[in-house]
């Protein structure tokens, strides 16, 4: 595996300007760390070493699970040879003037020979960009600005990344990185990668120029239609503001838990203003902040499996906490009717048991997100058995954050028993779907594999 990388920085903007809450230098090392790289050598212009170290010092140490050295260079070629002299294998080399993401880097770790990395599925031909059918639509935004990429002979799009070794460098004669890349273009084989988040930061680019790029990448396409059409309009400015402040996604998730507790506690107050206050705080938290933590994670390259699992816990709490508070409130205010507490206990035990079964099945199948599994389930079911038109038409009515909007609207009736029974129905409905999916999805996968092998 390739575990070493050499990064060249010649522009102070690489470690001063922020792009989606991170400097380019910080983004580069974070992405390399998440992709399994162990050693990074940074070469910078004279007088800039301390500034780069200051920029990197602002990264949470848990996000940089690698070693790095920073040195200033006067002769680029000699400095590169000196830096990689003790590396007995291929290494990655690039400038820090590109936005790097693990989706690209993880595809490079297994390369065994020198190569110039290009983008697969997209070509620049006659000034126009063409895409293969399989190319994901969300990555097309990378090529919406021609200054974000460099086309090679034949139309291939360069990622401005090469895999080389010390022997190759020693045979090259160059004085700057552009000359080095021209040599690589003419002498190295082309190796295309696909489905990757990457973009070149063109000279004079402003951080604001990349907002649409970040938003397209951060936007959650598998969300419900209501969430995409309504909640995203409010979450976008908030997510970018929080990202620029350097707020971590888990901080947002922790805040969401606190707000769910506060809003649910308001339901214990027997006043109409309290239930309206619950509705306002709860809808903001469940509808807007719930999007922000995921959007910030994708904007700032914070995605982790643990973060995804924590987000699912928060999703469960947003309905469980108000249901608990409503059961207590209905018991107190309704003259001690025990039915609310009994139904609450049964609902929590059943839903928790099914959630544990679901989590075990998801881990076995390699899923972290329920939404992603649901999308694949619907797609697979459609391919094998066909999805009814009625089911397709009904999905927008009950999928995603529109369910929280229903609770928000019902709250203004001021009837806590109605809210309680609606939430009980929601838990029963979701638990039933989860259990059904847990049982049937593996069978669909097995049948799909059998069909593929037969074909």
Image (cartoon, rainbow, N blue to C red):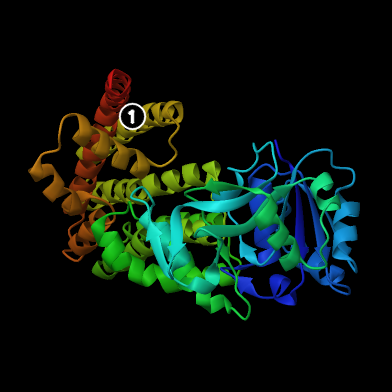
Residue in the image at 20% along x and 37% along y: 339
Give x and y (percent) for residue 119.
52, 53
The residue sitting at 45% across, 39% down in the picture is 368
Q: Quadrant of the N terminus?
A: top right
Residue found at the very far left of the displayed protein: 390
User: Residue drawn 86% across and 70% down?
Assistant: 50
**Is 129 positioned to the left or the right of 334 in the image?**
right
**215 lies above or below 451:** below
In-image side of 310 versus 9 (left or right): left
Provide residue 245's location: percent of width, then percent of height.
Answer: 59, 71
The quadrant of the picture occupied by the C terminus is: top left
Is residue 305 shown to the viewer in this render?
yes
> Horizontal placement of 392 versus 319: left or right?
left
Query: Would you say residue 102 is visible in this rendering?
Result: no
Residue 360 in the image, given as x and y percentages of width and height: 43, 27
- Front-lying residue, 33 or 204: 204
Crowding at dot 1, Cα within 10 Å, few <14 / some 14-19 / many 20+, comes out as: some
- The residue depicted at 69 percent of the width and 62 percent of the height is 182
Q: In the image, is 56 to the left or to the right of 188?
A: right
Q: Which of 390 and 382 lies nearest the eye of the viewer?
A: 382
Instruction: Return the residue at label 1.
Output: 354
| 310 or 267, nearer to the observer | 310
């Amino acid at each position: 595996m390739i575990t070493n990388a050499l990064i060249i920085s010649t522009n102070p903007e690489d470690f001063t300007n922020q792009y989606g809450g991170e400097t380019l230098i910080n983004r580069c090392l974070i992405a390399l760390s998440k992709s399994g790289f162990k050693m990074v050598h940074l070469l910078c212009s004279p007088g800039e070493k301390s500034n780069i170290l200051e920029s990197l010092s602002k990264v949470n140490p848990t996000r940089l699970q690698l070693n790095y050295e920073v040195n200033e260079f006067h002769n680029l070629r000699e400095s590169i040879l000196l830096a990689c002299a003790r590396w007995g294998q291929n290494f990655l080399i690039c400038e820090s003037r590109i936005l790097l993401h693990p989706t690209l880097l993880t595809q490079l770790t297994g390369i065994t020979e020198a190569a110039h990395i290009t983008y697969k599925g997209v070509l620049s031909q006659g000034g126009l960009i063409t895409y293969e059918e399989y190319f994901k639509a969300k990555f097309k935004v990378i090529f919406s600005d021609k200054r974000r990429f460099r086309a090679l002979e034949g139309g291939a799009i360069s990622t401005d990344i090469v895999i080389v070794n010390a022997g190759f460098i020693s045979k090259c004669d160059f004085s700057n990185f552009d000359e080095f890349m021209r040599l690589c273009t003419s002498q190295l084989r082309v190796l295309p990668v696909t489905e990757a988040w990457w973009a070149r930061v063109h000279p004079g680019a402003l951080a604001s120029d990349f907002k649409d790029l970040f938003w397209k990448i951060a936007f959650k396409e598998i969300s419900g239609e209501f969430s995409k059409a309504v909640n995203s309009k409010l979450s976008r400015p908030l997510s970018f503001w929080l990202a620029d402040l350097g707020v971590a996604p888990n901080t947002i998730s922790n805040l969401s838990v606190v707000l769910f507790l506060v809003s649910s506690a308001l339901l214990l107050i027997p006043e109409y203003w309290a239930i309206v206050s619950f509705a306002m705080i709860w809808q903001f938290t469940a509808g807007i902040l719930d999007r922000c933590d995921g959007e910030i994670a994708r904007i700032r390259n914070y995605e982790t499996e643990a973060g995804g699992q924590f987000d699912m816990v928060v999703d469960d709490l947003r309905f469980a906490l108000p249901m608990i508070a409503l059961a207590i409130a209905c018991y107190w205010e309704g003259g001690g009717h025990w039915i609310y507490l009994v139904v609450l206990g049964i609902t929590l035990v059943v839903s928790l048991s099914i959630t544990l079964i679901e989590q075990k099945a998801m881990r076995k199948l390699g899923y972290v997100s329920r939404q992603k599994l649901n999308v694949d389930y619907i797609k697979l079911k459609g391919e094998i058995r066909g999805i009814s038109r009625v089911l397709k038409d009904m999905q927008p009515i009950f999928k995603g954050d529109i369910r929280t909007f229903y609770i928000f609207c019902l709250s203004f009736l001021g009837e806590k028993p109605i809210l309680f029974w609606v939430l009980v129905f929601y838990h029963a409905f979701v638990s039933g779907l989860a259990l059904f999916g847990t049982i049937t999805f593996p069978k669909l996968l097995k049948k799909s594999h059998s069909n593929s092998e037969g074909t």
